[in-house]
Amino acid sequence: MKLFMKLTLQWRITILTAIVLVICSSALTVFSILNAQKTLMPLIYDSISITKTDDNSVDMVIQGIDNNKIENSGTALRTAKRDFDLKSIMFFLALTTIGTGLVYFVSGEALRPVKNLSKQVSEIDERDLSLRLTESLSHDEVSSLTKSFNQALERLEEAFNRQKRFSASAAHELKTPLATMKAGIQVLKIDKFTTLDEYKENAHMMEASVDRLTQVVNDLLILASPNEEADELKEEVYLDAMFETIFDELSPIYEHRRITYNIECDAISFYGNAALLYRAFFNLMENSYKYNHEKGSITVHGSKTNKCVRIEVEDTGIGIPAEYLPFIFDAFYRVDGSRSRKIAGSGLGLSIVKTIIERHGGTISVSSENVKGTKISIQLPQ
């Protein structure tokens, strides 16, 4: 069996078909020989009359043939039967051989598209995933396989590109505070007359850089960690209390922008991990503040059904252009770098939000209109 599985698909098809041909041809040959013996031989022997003489001896007379020719007729009959059997066996061998050869040729032609597909696939490597297989105009299984493979390549290429962007952005986010810390240390080493105030200033700068590094690392751990908290999603979370706490924490920071908020949750509660959910909704509210207009507003609306809790966060901010919406949940992705540089952040906030919501078995979607505001809809199971 192992040897058989090592053969090419064409040879396996040929061998299996040859076995079927041998079985069918053998059955047909045996049937024809036996049928000849059952059908033809009785007809011949029926033409022989057998009579008894007075002395009880048997006298055989073949109708139309003299008695002296009986022996010759029997010999001819046996010879004819042997020739018939031999020709049947020879025909069986010839049919099997020719049929096997034709199967090998036909299967080779039928499998040619598969061979071409295999050759094209072998030319694709991880250095260039932009190559696509040539799709045939037919609607057979090979064509369907080619389309499926091309779709898989598209998803794989997209995943590789996301991974490259993630790696580059992560390196940038980690490199910047490290470079700041190193520059401060080098300045202190070069300057022999460094004052105490300068040491304090560098220490403050390094502390801020360490805090930034710690935040990035913690965010990455949340994104990369498995669902370890799955068994801890049993705390009762009250939406109105959670959002009141979040706004109490954020409002003083953005007080100068005079942004108002409104919570419409009607004492809705559900079960989940309170700490993770607080982190997710804190990130959402912080974004609503950061990207809002002065004197803008933020509205949180909650509703509850028998199956799920629906939460909608709507702001009157600068909005998100439609072409950026598919990417806003990617790690380190920031909309329109020119404007994002004006607002502090690592680009991990919405990625963390999506990860936490999905970890709770929920879904999140975004609708936005540029310059007019953004609406984020979240559904969480009861």
Image (tube, rainbow, N blue to C red):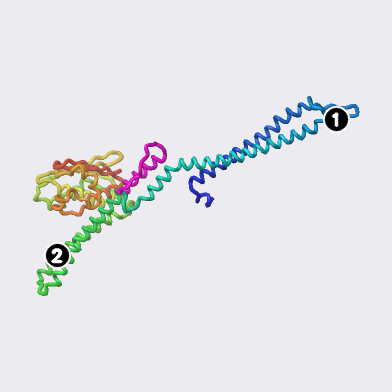
| Residue positioned 67% across, 38% down in the render | 86
Q: Pointer 1: what residue?
A: 58
The answer to whether residue 133 is visible is: yes
Distance of label 2 from label 1 (alpha carbons): 133 Å
Instruction: Place residue 179 in its image quadrant.
Output: bottom left
Q: Look at mark 2 in the image and give the residue it sits on.
A: 204
Q: Nearer the viewer, residue 130 or 217?
A: 130
- Is residue 99 depicted above or below 356 in this figure? above
Disc 1 marks which amino acid? Val
From the top left corner, tell me how far across and down residue 8 is, in percent.
Answer: 48, 48
Characterize the local packing of mark 1: few (<14), some (14-19) or many (20 or more) Cα atoms within 10 angstroms.
few
Which contiguous range is marked in magenta?
Answer: 130-157
Q: 181 or 33: which is nearer to us?
A: 33
Residue at x-position 28% and y-position 57% = 221
Label 2 is placed on what type of residue?
His
Q: Helix, strand, or loop for circle 2?
A: helix
Task: Decide if residue 152 is on the left or right side of residue 7.
Answer: left
* Outermost residue to the bottom: 192
**Residue 233 in the figure: left or right of residue 4:** left
Residue furthest to the right in view is 55
Q: Secondary structure at mark 1?
A: strand
Looking at the image, is mark 2 or mark 1 nearer the viewer? Answer: 1
> Residue 291: percent from the left, percent from the top?
15, 47
Magenta highlight on residue 160: no
Q: Note whether residue 262 is visible.
A: no
The disc, 2 or 1, on the residue closer to the chain's N-terminal end is 1
Judging depth in this view, the residue of 112 and 178 nearest the camera is 112
